[in-house]
Amino acid sequence: MAAKFEPVLTRNVGKPEALTLKGYRQLGGYEGLAKALTMEPDAVIDEVKKSGLRGRGGAGFPAGMKWSFIPKGKDKPKYLVCNADESEPGTFKDRLLMENDPHQLIEGCAICCFAVSAATCYIYIRGEYTKSAVILERALKEAYDAGILGDNVLGSGFKLNMYVHRGAGAYICGEETGMLESLEGKRGQPRVKPPFPAVVGAFGAPTVINNVETLCNVPHIITRGADWFKSIGTDEKNTGPKLYAISGHVDRPGTYEHPIGITFREMLDAAGGMWHGRQLKAFIPGGASAPILKPDQIDLKMDFDTVAKAGSMLGSAAVIVMDETTCMVRSVARLSKFFNHESCGQCTPCREGTNWMELVLDRLEHGEGTERDSQLLLSICKNIGGQSLCALGDAAIGPVKSLVDRFPEEIEQHVRNRACPFPRPRYFENGA
Amino acid sequence: MSVHEPASVKPPGPQTRGGGLSAASRAEIDGLRERYPTTEAVLLPALHIAQRQWGGWLPDEAITAVAEALDLPVARVYGVVTFYDLFHQKPVGRHRIRVCNNLSCQLRGAEEILEVLHRELGVGEDEVTPDGRCSYVHFECLGSCDTAPMMMVDDEYHENLTPNRVRQVLKGLK
């Protein structure tokens, strides 16, 4: 299948005409929306359900099912919030979609809004993505001017407003309820669930929250049908095209579109193999939150369920590759620093625990660790896991647990040598 | 529908001293109200606008001005400002440099980029050069891992950096 696979989501990448409405339409754009508007809203939801599309933001929740949780009827306001807060370390796929094909996202959002009868959509975009925000604003203006958005979407009588809302630098705002708080003008601290956003979401109203890549799949599902979508992928539960963002020690880092479920080895080959031909030491299959895997998993199928069975998660499919020169303690210490910085501070186990993990890993890396530190780290993980309101706490323990479980010898070496056994790599010679 | 270019894209306006929000900032903020069912939701965009007016940071008078414009308690606005990394409470350089040094960039030499900035600018992280030109910080993942190491200067991404490229970029900053 891999040989015949034609890019779907990235088909317009590298075609500058896709940035304009005219160009996007010439490439077949907005046909999905036009078709959806002739269908019953429930039929649109059913088609997405049938396709098996699962959320591409990290959790992998079935998108059509999420839509079907929204109460029916048009009497009360409902919202779609598109999660464009891409902040998971290692992830850069949504930026590619927004910068190269903004109308594809707008079309996906519009179809979703029609399906759940939402009259307002906010695209919540991380504050650092200024370029994406400008490109989307321009595309939105064009869509309004052409009657694709506004009071009468493509002459159907359906009313839809769509706005870009910029965040201000906080990873936690990618968590769906943290995002809603932030959208409402507050600190981005996640809410207690239930109630889930489908019942009480933005401004107290039922709300769908979907990732950029998830929504970009929707026009294609409507145009080409659920059966076509299901024909791509591993099995019934892992369907469709998938963007993999691969970075670190590979020859050609980048965003690659493959059928979901391609093996890590195939993906690595597509990215030119290991950087400088070095040996693979470890890889993270799904962004900073995903437990680290060893080379014995090189033939792992990169879909939601197979990666989960292997003791990690596909997450946002941000693949970070590390070669033999990498110090795992230093790498995980960096990730712990990130989670400590980004913990919103609301729940004590996460706020305090992420801080302790960073401190312990840092002292290990600096040769000041003790033989009891592995146990200490596991004990901290145990006290964070499942003890906080949102998934950040659980995300933070993923890399740490996998370090202790899968690379114990490296921790021991740090303790025994009273120093990091790896020379600090220099990437640039003579300061050039 | 009015199209609102993201606040920080426009060049910073003259620094305000005691004048509160400028008429232009106020108009821009008022233009956003129709987008949201509550006034509170205008707060993040309003803070971006105010920060631009005050030259890249939010002194107390800016926070007070935004609170007044949106009829919110100052403490609420202050709480929001302190939560987000892109809002600054102390002066920054005319050009703000953010270097990603999260894992993917660390694996490609981000630490050396920070060393070059330190050497070339002669100040530490989060400090402003004596001429007010630049300040720099390390930053969490900026979503450009495939072009690591990278840094963001104001709103622009500079990718696939080498020490020489960093020096070139610095030369271009006035």
Image (cartoon, coloured by chain):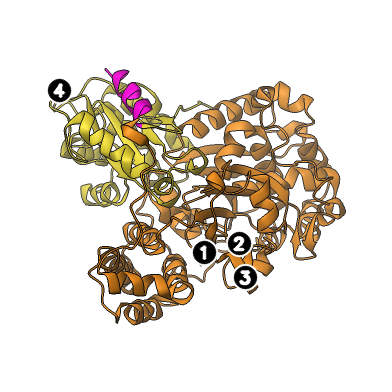
Relative depth, front residue between A11 and A191: A11
Q: From the image, tell me which residue sits under label 1.
A: A290
The secondary element bearing badge 4 is classed as loop
Q: From the image, tell me which residue sits under label 4.
A: B131
Residue B2, percent from left and from top: 50, 26
Q: Earlier in the sequence, mark 2 or mark 3?
A: 3
Q: Is residue B164 magenta?
A: yes
Q: Amino acid at mark 4?
A: Asp
Q: From the image, tell me which residue sits under label 3.
A: A308
A265 vs B31, left or right, is right
- The answer as to whether the residues below labels 2 and 3 share one chain is yes
Residues drawn in magenta:
B163-174
Q: What letter labels the chain drawn in yellow?
A: B
B112 vs A12, left or right, is left
Q: Is residue B43 magenta?
A: no
Residue A377, percent from left and from top: 35, 76
Q: What letter labels the chain drawn in orange?
A: A
Q: CA distance from mark 2 to mark 3?
A: 7 Å
Q: Amino acid at mark 2?
A: Leu
Quadrant occupied by the C terminus of chain B: top left
| Contact (Cβ within 8 Å) of mark 1 with mark 2 | yes
Relative depth, front residue between A284 and A250: A250
Image position of B151 with respect to A377: above or below: above
Q: Chain of mark 3?
A: A
Q: CA distance from mark 4 to mark 3?
A: 53 Å
Label disc, if present, on residue A103 of the rendered structure: none
Q: Chain of mark 1?
A: A
The secondary element bearing badge 3 is classed as helix
Residue A243, percent from left and from top: 65, 48
The secondary element bearing badge 2 is classed as loop
Label disc, if present, on residue A314 of the rendered structure: 2
